Amino acid sequence: MEEVLSSIEPVVTEQMNRYLTAPYTQEEIVHALKHMHPFKAPGPDVITNRLKLILLVIIHESQSAFVPGHHITYNALIAFEIFHMVKLNKDRAHGVFAFKLDMAKAYDRVEWCFLESMMRHIGFHSSMVDLIMRCVTSVFFRVLVNGFPRAEFEPSRGLHKGDPLSHFFFFFLRRSTLGPTTPSRNKEACSWSENLPYYTKNEPLVVCGRLYCVWANAAEVGIISTIMERYEVVSGQKVNLEKSTIFFSGGVTPDLRLELANLLGVQCQGQRGSYLGIPSSVGRSKVEIFQMLVDRTRKKSKDWKRRFLFGAGKIVLIKAVLQAIPTYLMSSFAIPKQICQRLNSVAANFFWGQKLDERRIRWKSWNKLCMAKVEEGISFRDLSRFNQAMLAKQVRRLAKNETSLLARSLKARYFPRNDIFLASKAHKPSFVWTSLLVGRDLLARGMVWHLGDGARIRIGIDAWLPDGRGNYLEAQDMGRVAEVFPSTEVWKIASNLALDSTKRDRIFWPHGRGNVYTVKSGYHVAGEIHRRERKLQLRLILAAYGNGFGG
């Protein structure tokens, strides 16, 4: 155990320990009690609430789940980028592979002694460690045999899945797999790895503690196998080789793939695998990949059609369930319009029909049903616009938190010399990046710039006046302003040309409360843009017909 934990450096400072071990205040206790539901599992307690405040310092930056300000989609998107770069690597001399680990009965197999030693090596105060271990080891069980309880017995390992502290403990345990003992020792670097700031020449890429990207050779596989064996012995964890998969780059020969997969004892993964609920690769046939959303929605609606439901009940089920099924994938990918149309068709058939596989007259088009209730609609979602609003939310997070692992990864690959609003499509982009550009377009058309040093604002393109109009001029020359802009705008520009070289230009969203972007406000803006474009197309068509008749 000491051999594994010897590389772990203390990260909990003395100041943090003083905060963690301070007497509990009345406000903390009241706050924890108010978050306890009478008919559900207990929510976060005082210890959990204190650990949350220092969690960003304790855990590795590749961990995103359960961390305030982080999102599980960050790891999923990074993993997709890794699979995409592995797929693009055709170098036979420097082949790589991505290795996805799956732990068997992860919560049930945690050794308490290893957890305690891990917390002490991280730097927790002994009193805090003792308090946490008392919470962990105080459990006991009684088994019913023929309806009668037997004697109590105490386990020696395992964590309760419903405990709010349990997922924090896994963060502590995974630090042992993210230390300098991990491979690779190869001193050369793949050409594509230079674009990944979190990849080093002496260590593999690690995402979420379960995804490794290393060189495709027997030496690297041997190091991984040794690390897994040591980790299993000291922690009690067990790698599920049947569910673990390996994904090779295009330059790795079939014979080498088979050899390395056999050494690890795992199966090779094709193009149809998944990671954290999203596809690991999306090829040309995107409709085929996302057809499973339609299948899931259709299956759910068929189960409901066996029951008699009123119109109000159908509306609730469509909004709360059917249109919520694709939400997770819509936050990461631009779902093809054909799939969105099929999803709308499934919802429409369920709304107008009653019996299984019954098709009835649709007395209103789906577009009208998606209109607001004040416009005589039912406020169903238009999934295409909702998808764009979800992607815009992801882009807003990246722009706001430029130091996150996902933001740094995308910046190194697609826009190393500017920001995400000036980024281009790039060469051989991933489907994640092209999807984010769809959301970026919506965000760019609705946001307004707050003037700072003026370096990020483009003349003739970006809106920066308070009403969302106007452009930036590099010089405060009102003569040039009067030449370029209408006289009605000159006074607005004059009042907003106060440059501040100490501050960067910032964006804000004037369409939501507190100038904060929300999916709801983005959805409404996307609807307004769509209606304006439809009106413009109609005017152009009428003008073309008018010119034809006039000729």
Image (cartoon, rainbow, N blue to C red):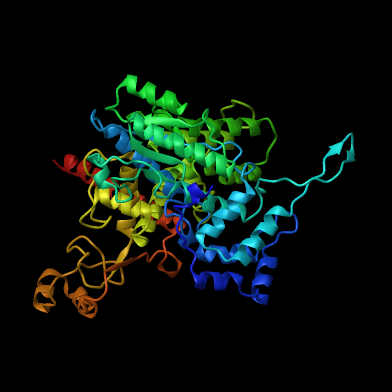
Residue lying at the far front of the rendered structure: 2
On the rendered image, what quadrant is the C terminus found in?
Answer: top left
In the image, residue 149 above or below residue 500:
above
Q: Nearer the viewer, residue 345 or 141?
A: 141
In the image, residue 262 above or below residue 316:
above
Asked whether residue 361 is in view, the answer is no
Report the residue at 28% width, 39% height from top: 186
Report the residue at 30% width, 38% height from top: 85
Give residue 90's position: percent from left, percent from top.
Answer: 24, 30
Asked whether residue 406 is in view, the answer is yes
Report the residue at 58% width, 38% height from top: 351
Give residue 368's position: percent from left, percent from top.
Answer: 47, 45
Residue 335 is left or right of residue 433, and the answer is right
Report the residue at 59% width, 52% height from top: 115
The part of the image, by quadrant, that contains residue 110 is: top right
Residue 170 is left or right of residue 133, and the answer is left
Q: How many marks?
A: 0
Give residue 275's position: percent from left, percent from top.
Answer: 46, 38
Give residue 43's position: percent from left, percent from top.
Answer: 66, 59
Q: Nearer the viewer, residue 365 or 62?
A: 62
Q: Nearer the viewer, residue 79 or 501?
A: 79
Residue 119 is left or right of residue 178, and the answer is right
Q: Nearer the viewer, residue 519 or 278?
A: 278
